[in-house]
Image (cartoon, grey):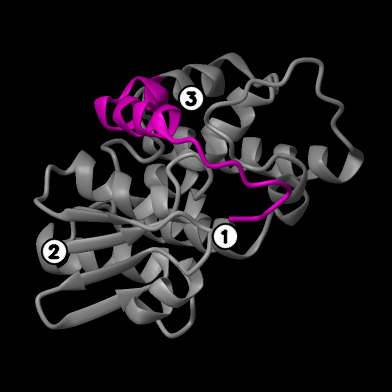
């Protein structure tokens, strides 16, 4: 398999698919395209006519969009283990990921992912706080339903991969969370795969200003 991604430092969508593959120790090649650099748009469209990353190539098959990629990986390479085995938990996890996919625009805009930066005394607007409150509600429900002290739905799942960029954002901007959720963020950040991603981000030199990636 070949996964085409953007910058480690900025590309939250790329992180989701990459983290799922790495966490489940699947073999794949990473093709990194530095976003918003000369020729990068044309390079990406060579893999995906929509001009977006990530893109997964599996032999002759191409899958684009992070949620579709994660679904494909779970179905074809994990025997469905990307999602919780329990039907109720699986439904909740899928709904949580879909909500992440389409919502939280205020948080995305005000707290862009930047793995190399730590912000102190960040002022949170009412709109951003509303997004944070909803994320707190979602995570708390997931941990309660799964009775988990590890990941959102027990074992690591697509949901954890999908919310990993949110973990980076909340941590990097110093957002205060309930103790249970702060501990969850610390567990995600401590994953060897997340530490690897952060190291790769720190090695990059590109700077992207005010872009949602």
Question: On screen, 40 above or below 32?
Answer: below
As helix, strand or loop, the secondary structure at mark 1 comes to loop
- Is the residue marked by circle 1 packed among few (<14), some (14-19), or many (20+) residues within 10 Å? some
At 58% from the left edge and 14% from the top edge, which residue is drawn? Answer: 179
Q: Which mark is residue 23?
A: none
Q: Residue 65: name its quadrant.
A: bottom left
- Is the residue marked by circle 2 packed among few (<14), some (14-19), or many (20+) residues within 10 Å? some
At 35% from the left edge and 34% from the top edge, which residue is drawn? Answer: 197
At 66% from the left edge and 43% from the top edge, which residue is drawn? Answer: 112
Q: Which residues are magenta?
A: 187-213
- Measure the C-alpha gap from mark 3 to mark 1: 30 Å
As helix, strand or loop, the secondary structure at mark 2 comes to loop
Q: Give whichever of discs 1 and 2 has the lower sequence position.
A: 2
- Is the residue marked by circle 3 packed among few (<14), some (14-19), or many (20+) residues within 10 Å? many
Q: Camera-side residue: 93 or 165?
A: 165
Residue located beneath label 1 in the image: 36
Circle 3 or circle 2, nearest the eye: 2
Answer left or right for 20 relative to 80: right
Residue located beneath label 3 in the image: 185
Residue located beneath label 2 in the image: 1
- Measure the C-alpha gap from mark 3 to mark 2: 29 Å
């Amino acid at each position: 398999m070949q996964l085409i991604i953007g910058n480690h430092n900025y590309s939250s969508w790329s992180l989701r698919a990459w983290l799922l593959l790495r966490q489940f120790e699947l073999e794949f090649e990473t093709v990194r395209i530095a976003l918003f650099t000369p020729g990068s748009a044309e390079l990406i469209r060579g893999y995906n006519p929509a001009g977006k990353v990530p893109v997964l190539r599996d032999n002759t098959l191409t899958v684009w969009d992070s949620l579709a990629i994660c679904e494909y990986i779970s179905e074809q390479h994990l025997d469905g283990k990307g999602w919780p085995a329990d039907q109720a938990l699986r439904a909740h996890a899928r709904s949580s990921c879909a909500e992440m996919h389409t919502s939280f625009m205020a948080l995305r805009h005000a707290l862009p992912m930047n793995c190399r930066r730590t912000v102190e005394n960040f002022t949170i607007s009412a709109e951003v706080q509303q997004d944070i409150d909803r994320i707190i509600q979602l995570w708390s429900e997931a941990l309660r339903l799964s009775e988990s002290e590890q990941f959102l739905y027990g074992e690591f799942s697509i949901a954890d991969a999908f919310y990993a960029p949110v973990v980076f954002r909340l941590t990097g901007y110093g957002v205060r969370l309930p103790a249970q959720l702060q501990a969850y963020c610390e567990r995600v950040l401590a994953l060897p795969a997340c530490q690897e991603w952060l190291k790769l981000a720190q090695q990059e030199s590109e700077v992207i200003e005010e872009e949602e990636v």
